[in-house]
Amino acid sequence: MITKENNLKVMRVFFENPSKEFHLRQLSRITGISLGGILKIIPRLKKEKLLLSRKERNTELVSPNFEGRFTIFKRLYNVQSLYDTGLIATLQKWYEQPKTIILFGSYSRGIDTEKSDIDIAVFTNSKPHPDLSIFERKLSRKINIHVINDREKNNSFKNSLANGIVLEGVMELI
């Protein structure tokens, strides 16, 4: 049976492994969806310009379509995963309701790879960083927290933040 949940299971494989190609049987094993289900889902996702495929010998290899809409959905997935793991709630509590939390860098743009880190700016008074190892394991990424107070806003950092995603609070023009 094809459901939106099954489509998401397939896409999750590519969101978490954006630089890899998978053959259809491999996708079936990873997702727990029958090969018949995979054979129906992949053409649909290719038509939506989310995935690409190529033939190698007798095998169809599937990969993300970075020229299509894949990065848009990957951005949404990335942001949702930060909330689902509890990272954002933990940062809010640790920094006692900071003025703003901004996700920036490749993770915010949906062009991250398995080796990319997660860059988050927190506008608050300086405070030591919380232990984020549990979230790094859940997200399989290193997390870099950049604590910024109002006096520390430097020009080279402004553009990175301006192109980021405000996760909590409001970003004032800096």
Image (cartoon, rainbow, N blue to C red):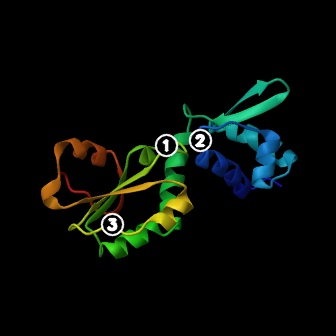
Few, some or many C-alpha atoms within 10 Å of disc 1 (few <14, some 14-19, many ≥20)?
many
Residue lying at 45% horizontally and 49% vertically, measured from the top left: 117
Give the secondary structure at mark 1.
Answer: loop
Q: Which residue reaches farthest top?
A: 57
- C-alpha gap between disc 2 and disc 1: 8 Å
Q: Going from the N terminus, do you reach mark 3 or mark 1 first? A: 1
The disc placed on residue 112 is 1
Spot occupied by residue 41 in the image (x, y as percentages of width and height)? 76, 44
Spot occupied by residue 5 in the image (x, y as percentages of width and height)? 70, 58
Residue lying at 70% horizontally and 49% vertically, measured from the top left: 10
Measured along the vertical axis of the image, is residue 91 above or below residue 31?
below
| 91, 100: nearer the viewer | 91
Spot occupied by residue 19 in the image (x, y as percentages of width and height)? 59, 37
Q: Are marks 2 and 1 in contact (CB under 8 Å)?
A: yes
Spot occupied by residue 48 in the image (x, y as percentages of width and height)? 64, 39
Q: Residue 21's image quarter?
A: top right
Disc 2 residue type?
Pro
Few, some or many C-alpha atoms within 10 Å of disc 2 (few <14, some 14-19, many ≥20)?
many
Measured along the vertical axis of the image, is residue 129 above or below residue 21?
below
Disc 3 residue type?
His
Residue lying at 51% horizontally and 44% vertically, measured from the top left: 115
Q: Going from the N terminus, do you reach mark 2 or mark 3 first? A: 2
